[in-house]
Image (tube, rainbow, N blue to C red):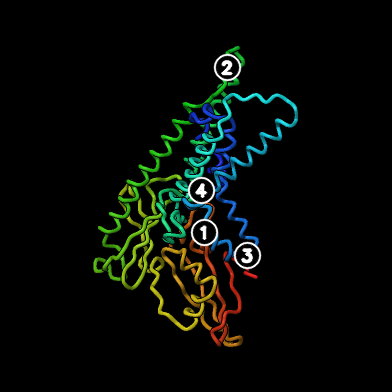
Amino acid sequence: MDPITHLMTGAVLARSGFNRKAAYATVAMTLAAEIPDLDTLWSIRGPIAALQHHRGWTHTFLGVPLEAAVVVGGIYLFHRWRLKRDKPVKQAAPIRWGLLYCFALIALLSHLLLDWTNSYGLRPFFPFNPRWYAGSLVFIFEPVMFALLLIALLAPVLFGLINSEVGARKPAFRGRGWAIAALIAIVALWGWRAVEQQQAIQLALNSGDFGPAPNNVEILHVTAEPYPMNPFRWQVIVETPDFYQLATIDTFNNTVATNQHSDIFYKPAETAATLAAKQSWLGHVYLDWSRIPLVTQSDTDATTGLTIVTFRDLRFMYDVSFLHGREAPPLSGTVTVNGAHRITSMEMNGRVQR
């Protein structure tokens, strides 16, 4: 998920009652809910390093206890600094470092859960199990979830202003009911989307619209990827022995929209260029992560003898309001191979790996 959604999730979790049990619960859970994404700092070493390490060990069950210790340790140092200022430290809740560590663990696990719900996925059991898991229930940025979390955080403030105008007593903790309601609504949204996702997959399996010659295609696998906001709209990837086909499915109207020409991607044959590209750093990293990779090559340039091999993931080849998956699929890479089948350059998302 996007960083703001993670941060707000941690804050809302704290307001659901944890902030009443231990001091610094809100700051600890807010920070912990986002700290796994510090692995984006690997982008300093280039785009391929960023892909290789994003959602790496910081997004694993093995890394969570260490990250919780870092968060609580940082808050402990801040608390000691406050005490050294010789000013009384007033806390609305008692200081309980053990409980605070447990709360940080919960917030960290919320990060893993939210990342599982989108298409990119994560490897929670790494290094013991390198498999990627992805629920593909919500888009990388889900406006409905964002709105629920924002309301849960802002509504108590607005009602607090109203109460202060009429002279009502200000409570020590506000917003618990709003926070719990928002969290329940998010879980319900996931459940609803899971039902619609299975319906989309079933519609694809029952449809006879796939293949150059419809009604005569063996379907090996169907994957349904979410659109933002609309729980009834899904992008489906149908795999057959010879090709992949994309389709947009509306589970509300039970319709399947696909084109036997533009939506079919044939599985390309291996060539010396694609084999060389797959052995590159980008190739190893990309194929380790991608669930539905499509590796194609350009025609060899007659002047330079160079061939460009492109890596795409079909899960992200559909258009939404702020992404153009057909024209410029996100999370795509290219490897340039010379006539001797040696790698001359690598790019990821348009960035050259130096």
The foreground one among 202 and 43 is: 43
Q: Residue at left 62%, top 69%? A: 353
> In the image, 6: left or right of 80?
left
Looking at marks 3 and 1 on the same chain, the residue that comes earlier in the sequence is marked by 3
Residue where numbered disc 4 is placed: 64
- Amino acid identity at mark 1: His
Q: Secondary structure at mark 2?
A: helix
Marks 1/2 in contact by CB < 8 Å: the verdict is no
Instruction: Calculate the distance from the C-alpha at mark 2 to the C-alpha at mark 3.
Output: 52 Å
Which label sits in the foreground, 1 or 4?
4
Measuring from the top left, give residue 14's x and y in whole percent: 52, 33
Instruction: Calculate the distance from the C-alpha at mark 3 to the C-alpha at mark 4.
Output: 25 Å
Figure check: 301 above or below 15 = below
- Amino acid identity at mark 2: Asn
Marks 3/4 in contact by CB < 8 Å: the verdict is no
Q: Secondary structure at mark 4?
A: helix
- Amino acid identity at mark 4: Val
Residue where numbered disc 2 is placed: 163
Considering every residue shown, the one lying at the far right of the view is: 85
Q: Residue at left 63%, top 37%? A: 76
Instruction: Calculate the distance from the C-alpha at mark 3 to the C-alpha at mark 1.
Output: 23 Å
Q: Secondary structure at mark 3?
A: loop
Looking at marks 3 and 4 on the same chain, the residue that comes earlier in the sequence is marked by 3
> In the image, 142: left or right of 43?
left
Q: Residue at left 41%, top 34%? A: 184
Dot 2 alpha-carbon crowd within 10 angstroms: few under 14, some 14 to 19, many 20 or more: few
Residue where numbered disc 3 is placed: 46
Q: Residue at left 46%, top 58%? A: 126
Mark seen at residue 324: 1
Which label sits in the foreground, 3 or 1?
3
- Amino acid identity at mark 3: Gly
